[in-house]
Image (cartoon, rainbow, N blue to C red):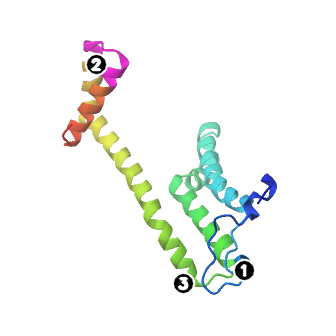
Amino acid sequence: MRCRWKYWNRCNWLRPVEEGATKLSDKINPPGVALVTSLIVIPIAIIMAGTVSATLMPPSHPLLGTLQLIGSPMVALMIALVLAFWLLALRRGWSLQHTSDIMGSALPTAAVVILVTGAGGVFGKVLVESGVGKALANMLQMIDLPLLPAAFIISLALRASQGQQP
């Protein structure tokens, strides 16, 4: 089967036919590339607008507070979630059970990413507040090692500061 790039999204390669379906198009109706791409780009653009507004606008500007609120990552992601729910579920006529199943199956993967990111941020803050980062930097300046051995020592020290054994 030969497809052109323009029609790549419409090719039905490797898509299983569900039980009872007479044709593949009876059950599977994926969203378009433009819709999915816009749902990914919108929160990034909102976060960028909040960041740029904080940098370029004077502190007394009346829209600054609103743009910073909307541009915070959690609010921007919540806006993207509501848009995704509206564009992918409500406008397509999905039932509440079908929508719940799809969003429920996506949450564990997203939760792991958010948990790991948050834990990394918390660990970084702990290293800054406890002074381990400065002590490690001072130690490496005194030793004057090449890059690879220094990176290895840093990873060992960070694992030890986490309480893990090397």
Q: Amino acid at mark 3?
A: Gln
Mark 2 is surrounded, within 10 Å at the Cα level, by few (under 14), some (14 to 19) or many (20 or more) other residues, namely: some
Q: Nearer the viewer, residue 76 or 31?
A: 31
Q: Residue at x 47, y 66 (%)?
A: 107
Q: Is residue 50 above or below residue 145?
A: below
The disc at residue 23 is: 1
Marks 1 and 3, how far apart in space?
A: 24 Å
Marks 2 and 1, how far apart in space?
A: 65 Å
Q: Which quadrant, please, contains the C terminus?
A: top left
Q: Earlier in the sequence, mark 2 or mark 3?
A: 3
Q: Is residue 75 left or right of residue 5?
A: left
Q: Which residues are magenta?
A: 141-151
Residue 147, x across and y down, in percent: 37, 19
Q: Residue at x 43, y 65 (%)?
A: 108
In the rendered image, residue 75 lying in the magenta stretch gets the answer: no
Residue 98, x across and y down, in percent: 57, 81
Q: According to the image, label 3 marks what residue?
A: 97
Q: Nearer the viewer, mark 2 or mark 3?
A: 3
Q: According to the image, label 2 marks what residue?
A: 140
Callout 3: SS = helix
Q: Nearer the viewer, mark 2 or mark 1?
A: 1
